[in-house]
Image (spheres, rainbow, N blue to C red):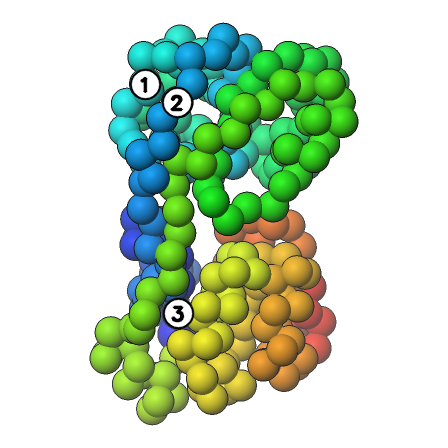
């Protein structure tokens, strides 16, 4: 299957390798560009640094103000980025809700620095504030939509040389659908979660939309080889 991968370039390369190992052809066409904001990091003190994306550590090394503070984060990619930046990782959760549950159950309350993007779900802010945590937010990166795709991607869509697209978030799905135009109705849309699928339903036929059983890339990619998903069972 010829699959459009719309993640940022640094993340899309790993996805393309996974697809190739399964016999698929990946076409990389990011819909968002990541830019560090350069926002200063406060001195604290903090008990933990929190992050839900590897992009939180795009600035490189840990600032002196938080060097030595342990990280609790979402996803192994985020954990690797934190370690590369010089942090010790104390806990890795599969998703934001699980991170919150761990923080409340294991740490009770405390002071945390949340390194985040400008566009995000407010899960950590809302739930931790209600649990008595002092949370300081620093927006360390921004994701901006690309104005257009390369001509080879546009031509592949126009001539039917792409079969499917992977969608990871409502925002990136919306940006991808806008760039696809009429071609969106001809593709199979593999979505990380139901809220991502909801964005696709505004343009794509229901029969072309498939939802991963878990909000992770392994479950998302497994949909591509699921015979059931192509015959009407849209969750696998």
Indicate the secondary structure of the residue bearing disc 3: strand
Q: CA distance from mark 3 to mark 2?
A: 36 Å
Q: Is residue 153 above or below residue 82?
A: below
The quadrant holding residue 87 is top left
Q: Position of residue 52 (x, y in %)?
A: 52, 36
Indicate the secondary structure of the residue bearing disc 2: loop
Q: CA distance from mark 3 to mark 1?
A: 36 Å
Front: mark 1 or 2: 2
Indicate the secondary structure of the residue bearing disc 1: loop
Q: Is residue 61 above or below residue 173?
A: above
Q: 104 or 28, which is in the foreground?
A: 104
Q: 236 or 46, which is in the foreground?
A: 46
Reading the image, the residue beneath label 2 is 41
Which label's residue is closer to the chain start, 3 or 2? 3
* Residue in view at x 54 percent, y 24 percent: 136
The label shown at residue 4 is: 3
* Dot 1 and dot 2 residues touching (CB under 8 Å): yes
Q: Position of residue 73 (x, y in %)?
A: 52, 29
Q: CA distance from mark 1 to mark 2?
A: 7 Å
* Residue in view at x 32 percent, y 12 percent: 64
Reading the image, the residue beneath label 1 is 63
């Amino acid at each position: 299957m010829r699959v459009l991968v719309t993640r940022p370039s640094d993340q899309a390369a790993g996805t393309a390798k996974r697809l190739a190992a399964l016999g698929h052809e990946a076409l990389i066409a990011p819909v968002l560009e990541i830019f560090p904001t350069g926002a200063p990091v406060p001195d604290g003190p903090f008990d933990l640094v929190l992050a839900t994306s590897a992009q939180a550590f795009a600035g490189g090394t840990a600032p002196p103000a938080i060097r030595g503070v342990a990280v609790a984060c979402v996803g192994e990619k985020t954990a690797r980025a934190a370690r590369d930046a010089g942090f010790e990782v104390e806990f890795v959760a599969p998703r934001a809700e699980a991170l919150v549950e761990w923080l409340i159950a294991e740490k009770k309350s405390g002071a945390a620095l949340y390194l985040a993007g400008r566009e995000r779900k407010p899960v950590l802010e809302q739930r931790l504030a209600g649990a008595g945590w002092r949370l300081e937010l620093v927006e360390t990166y921004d994701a901006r939509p690309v104005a257009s795709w390369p001509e080879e991607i546009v031509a592949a869509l126009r001539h039917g040389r792409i079969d499917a697209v992977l969608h990871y978030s409502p925002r990136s799905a919306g940006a991808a659908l806008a760039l696809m135009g009429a071609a969106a109705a001809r593709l199979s849309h593999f979505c990380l979660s139901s809220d991502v699928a909801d964005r696709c339903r505004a343009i794509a036929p229901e029969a072309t939309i498939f939802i991963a059983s878990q909000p992770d890339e392994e479950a998302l990619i497994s949909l591509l080889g699921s015979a059931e998903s192509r015959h009407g069972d849209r969750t696998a």
